[in-house]
Amino acid sequence: MSHTLYNLRKARLHRSELAVPGSNPTMFEKALNSEADYIFLDLEDAVAPPEKIKARANIIAALKGMDWSGAGKTVSIRINGLDTHYMYRDVVELIEEVGQHIDTILVPKVGVPADLYMVDAMLSQIEQAKGFEPGRIGLEALIETAIGMANVEDVAKYPNRIEALHFGVADYAASLRSRTVVIGGLNPDYPGDQWHASLTRMLIACRSYGLRAIDGPFGGIDDPEGYMLSARRAAALGYEGKWAIHPSQIKMANEVFSPTDKEVEKAERMVVALKEAEAQGKGAASLDGKMIDAASERMARNVIATSDAIKEAASARKG
């Protein structure tokens, strides 16, 4: 992979991820004009089997007919699962027809690294045949089954194209036979957060291998407080963003996963204070009555980098 591609993938802003059913083309323009950082046009669970082929055609037409490149967004396609007969045509038709407009492929129900290898190999063959830039289209994996979580570290270290892991809580709950009251919500019978262990394990895998960690859906569209609670828990762990299955959830995700002005200002002061301490031969400093050190600077630079990415995305949308 070239340094340019690596830096592009690493820098993608991913606070809010809007799910858009391919079977509902009336939503495409609204998604394009929304404040979502990332859009995935869905061919899988949001599309009924009789609508799969039509949904694929809808997405191709939309990517050809609308200016997605100027929207400052990541455009992804959630293909159908590898266990369906729709998947191979999803990849072939979409990449051959509109591959230049697609940033990533979101692969559902990834259980083992070989699942990614299959899609990766198909992409590579199409790129060669069509003369596309090798490796430009990234892969993202949905971890939403027991076997996927059991193998999450091996999936995360897949060597080609992989950019992010997403926690697909709905199918994951079904796979574990968990009792839930709302997709992504908490069951009051459980003493705490029943998803914490899985979210943490997936996050560690992502951070170990340089991937983005994205939290999945919250089904309570009429429960903004529940969505915010779910998003804040993920953000506290270190997740970079969360799905929005309704446009009303975009603003909430952007808010939760954006550092505040106060946090950015403090992060910048941390960097300055530590540089001053370094010049004096010290490895630590005091800021606002608290000790800070090299680890503090690394955390501060994460905040600054996110703030810079948000500003760049906002500028791209205005431009």
Image (cartoon, grey):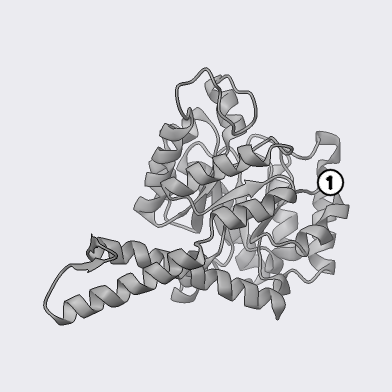
Q: Which residue is mark 1?
A: 23
Query: Are there few (<14), some (14-19), or many (20+) residues within 10 Å of tag 1?
Result: many
Viewer-closest of 214 and 130 = 214
Picture residue at 45% right of the left edge, 22% below the top: 191
Can residue 121 be seen here? The reply is no
Vertical comparison of 162 with 317: above or below = above
Vertical comparison of 221 with 313: above or below = above
Picture residue at 55% right of the left edge, 35% below the top: 144
Residue 72 in percent (x, y) is at 66, 70
Q: Is residue 10 left or right of residue 170?
A: left
Q: Name which residue type carries label 1.
A: Ser
Q: Is residue 62 left or right of residue 170?
A: right
Residue 132 in percent (x, y) is at 63, 71
Residue 75 in percent (x, y) is at 67, 61
Vertical comparison of 161 with 20: above or below = below
**Quarter holding residue 282:** bottom left
Picture residue at 50% right of the left edge, 36% below the top: 111
Q: Tell me the quadrant of the picture where the C terminus can be found.
A: bottom right
Vertical comparison of 124 with 196: above or below = below
Q: Secondary structure at mark 1?
A: loop
Q: Is residue 259 left or right of residue 37?
A: left
Can residue 165 be seen here? The reply is yes
Return the residue found at the far left: 281
Residue 183 in percent (x, y) is at 64, 31
Counting every numbered tag in the picture gives 1
Q: Is residue 180 left or right of residue 222?
A: left
Viewer-closest of 210 and 245 = 245
Viewer-closest of 148 and 244 = 244
Picture residue at 68% right of the left edge, 53% below the top: 250
